[in-house]
Image (cartoon, rainbow, N blue to C red):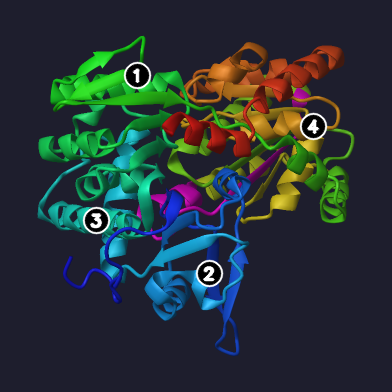
Amino acid sequence: MGDLTTERSNSTGTGTAPVLVASNRGPVSFSTAEDGTLDLRRGGGGLVSGLSAIGDPDAVWVCAALGDADRRAARAAPDGRLDRAGHDVGGQAVRMLDIDPETFARAYNGVANSTLWFVHHLLYATPTAPAFDAGFRTEWQAYTAYNAAFAEALAAEAAPGAAVLVQDYHLSLAPALLRAARPDLRIGHFSHTPWAPPEYFRLLPDDVAEAVLTGILGADRAGFLTRRWALAFAECCAAVLGAEVDREALTVTHAGRTTRLGVHGLGADADFLRERAHRPDVEERLAALREAVGDRRAVVRVDRTELSKNIVRGFQAYRHLLRTRPEWQDRVVHIAFAYPSRTDLAEYRDYTARVRELAAEINTEFGTDSWQPLILHVDDDFPRSLAAYRLADVALVNPIRDGMNLVAKEVPVVSDRGCALVLSREAGAHAELGEDALSVNPYDVIATSDALHAGLTMAADERADRTKRLAAAATALPPQQWFLDQLDALR
């Protein structure tokens, strides 16, 4: 692997970890304080709670250093093991990989986020993109090296026969690389994104498409958020590799090995959300939002400024509502919170600029001295998002394509009065929530506007009943159980 990592592992043979998780982003991150020391911040989510539920001190999380402070911490720790360097990593063993920054950037931005993400979310404007040239080949070499670094670390840490859960599109090659090094392991891969249909997946160069598929097929089990995405993966294996697919049993057989496909629809953590949504910082933000909205209705959306989230068409639908149903003027406020995303990519900076521009246009066209039709914040404020969830009369979740979309599941859980959910049929959550949501084609601005009107005029008792059913479906597989179910199935 050449100079891929600044410090290579000195480990030989097998490790002691009976369970391992591998993901690009780990459970902790570092920043540099003013005095030059490292500040550690612990994250949350399904993987964190799931791994902690095992209660095994020898379980190991392998992740990448994402910035200079992370790399400094990883470099100073023995074999990148943050727990052995005295860091408070929440009782979990964490191995952070100090991958060469240029290699990381090419793998992460060039392949994972600008290629695989675009393919799986059907985002390319195909008359001009993609164009897989010599520059892409350099990026693909980096992606391969990045995956090899993970496979090497996992092989070094894993006990004989250990269970390894590899996460997402960043690490699609790692299962096959790890199996070659450690055939004794039980290996799982989980895709948190949608999966592209074969005709779109084959935009990738043939050898790259084959490598992605055979990489995941190196796992004993490949997991997906919905049956739709699992079947799309299977169809790609059949079309690209000529693999044998059993669509009922959800198995793919190729090159003498059979990989089982699993479906695990990640749910919302009801206990955490309901407790967190009533803390003082949320109450403070809720009061401010209520003052801004007044006695008007509230349409709420909370997203990252991510191309697939479809914020622009959502704003266009709201504008159409105000233009064609003037009775809603001065009677509704659209609250839109858009967390900055991938600001190092030009497409995302341009998209965020368009979101801001369209919000300003709507406020200029319809706003009055006493009414701001659209309140937009482009920053990260989780307590404020929870406050908006509680306040919402209608939640708009209209992604072009989404592996799951937890916002659609979180809003019904914390809603104070019941909330109508306008939900894209292209969100993975639609498989579980569609029956009680107002379903929309995410490209159809007029139909989305009509759904907003239907949500705003829905009777209070119907809205409350739907919300109860939505909340029950949304919390059917909470994060901890979601993780443990995968681990049990793999074992």
Q: Amino acid at mark 3?
A: Ala
Q: Are marks 2 and 1 in contact (CB under 8 Å)?
A: no
User: Which of the two discs, 1 and 4, sits closer to the camera?
Assistant: 1
Question: Alpha-carbon distance for marks 4 and 3?
Answer: 45 Å
Residue on which disc 2 sits:
83
Question: Alpha-carbon distance for marks 1 and 4?
Answer: 34 Å
The residue shown at (74%, 50%) is 384
Q: Specify few, some or many for label 3: CA neighbours under 10 Å numbering under 14, 14-19, or 20 or more.
A: many
The residue shown at (79%, 47%) is 276
Numbered tag placed on residue 99 in the rendering = none
Question: Alpha-carbon distance for marks 4 and 2?
Answer: 39 Å
Question: Alpha-carbon distance for marks 3 and 2?
Answer: 23 Å
Foreground: 200 or 167? 167
As displayed, is residue 120 above or below residue 114?
Answer: above
User: Which of the two discs, 3 and 1, sits closer to the camera?
Assistant: 3
Residue on which disc 1 sits:
231
Within the image, what quadrant is residue 344 found in?
bottom left
Instruction: Verify whether residue 331 appears in magenta.
Output: yes
Numbered tag placed on residue 148 in the rendering = 3
The residue shown at (22%, 48%) is 177
User: Which of the two discs, 4 and 2, sits closer to the camera?
Assistant: 2
Q: Are marks 4 and 2 in contact (CB under 8 Å)?
A: no
Residue on which disc 4 sits:
415
